[in-house]
């Protein structure tokens, strides 16, 4: 019985749990922080703004109106011709005065222009143009093509004279 020995005591597995837990939490936090940083970096690359479009010089309202008037055809029916003519003139005046005059009636528009005072409406054929436009649109006034051509020329004159004085 000499080869029978006492039972050996249990091995001590005294692992330092607290330092191991702290190191594990720190590594986990670092992994989360790294993942967040990579996610933000990737998202920023995906949401990068497009390169700015080349800046084109703004076309002055006078030039826009004159170009539109040159493109206006006098062979249209008078009501359509005057609708387009009035739209061009109102767009021009809207850009000059920075007011939404497209929705104004003829009386409201003329009243606004009288209050603005420049240039005096007496010197411009604008009221007569608008009046003939009303006749052509609502009274089905038959106007000769020569009158349409003359009114187109008068509208160009209004645009040129209005911007020179403005």
Image: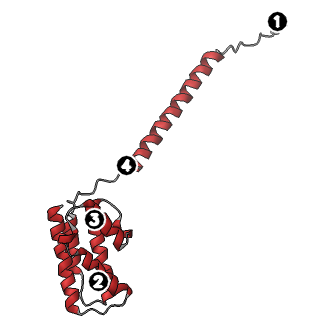
In the picture, the quarter occupied by the C terminus is bottom left
Residue 48, numbered circle = 4
In the structure shown, which secondary structural element does the residue marked by tag 1 occupy?
Answer: loop
Other residues around mark 4 within 10 Å, as few (<14) / some (14–19) / many (≥20): few
Which mark is nearer the camera, 1 or 4?
4
Dot 1 or dot 2: first in sequence order is: 1
In the structure shown, which secondary structural element does the residue marked by tag 2 occupy?
Answer: helix
In the picture, the quarter occupied by the N terminus is top right
| Residue 19 in picture, x, y percent from top left | 60, 16
Q: In the image, is residue 8 above or below residue 46? A: above
- The residue shown at (15%, 62%) is 165
16 or 115, nearer to the observer: 115
In which quarter of the view is residue 159 placed? bottom left
Q: Which residue was labeled with disc 2?
A: 132
Dot 3 or dot 4: first in sequence order is: 4
Q: Which residue was labeled with disc 3?
A: 113
Other residues around mark 2 within 10 Å, as few (<14) / some (14–19) / many (≥20): many
In which quarter of the view is residue 14 placed? top right
Which mark is nearer the camera, 1 or 2?
2
53 or 18, nearer to the observer: 53
- The residue shown at (29%, 78%) is 130
Q: In the image, is residue 82 above or below residue 36? A: below
103 or 122, nearer to the observer: 122
Dot 3 or dot 2: first in sequence order is: 3
Q: Is residue 39 left or right of residue 73?
A: right
In the structure shown, which secondary structural element does the residue marked by tag 4 occupy?
Answer: loop
Residue 2, numbered circle = 1
Which mark is nearer the camera, 4 or 2?
2
In which quarter of the view is residue 99 placed? bottom left
Is there CB contact under 8 Å for labels 3 and 2? no
Which mark is nearer the camera, 3 or 4?
3
Mark-to-mark CA distance, 3 and 1: 127 Å
């Amino acid at each position: 019985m000499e080869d029978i020995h006492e039972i050996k005591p249990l091995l001590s597995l005294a692992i330092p749990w607290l330092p191991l837990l702290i190191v594990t939490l720190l590594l986990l936090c670092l992994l989360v922080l790294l993942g967040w940083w990579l996610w933000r970096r990737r998202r920023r690359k995906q949401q990068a703004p497009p390169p700015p479009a080349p800046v084109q010089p703004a076309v002055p309202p006078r030039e826009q109106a004159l170009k539109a008037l040159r493109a206006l055809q006098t062979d249209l029916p008078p009501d359509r011709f005057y609708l387009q003519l009035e739209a061009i003139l109102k767009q021009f005046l809207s850009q000059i005065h920075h007011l939404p005059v497209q929705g104004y009636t003829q009386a409201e528009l003329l009243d606004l222009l009288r209050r603005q005072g420049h240039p005096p409406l007496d010197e411009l054929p604008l009221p007569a143009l608008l009046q003939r436009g009303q006749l052509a649109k609502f009274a089905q006034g038959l106007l000769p093509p020569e009158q349409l051509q003359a009114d187109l020329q008068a509208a160009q004159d209004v645009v040129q004279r209005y911007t020179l004085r403005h």
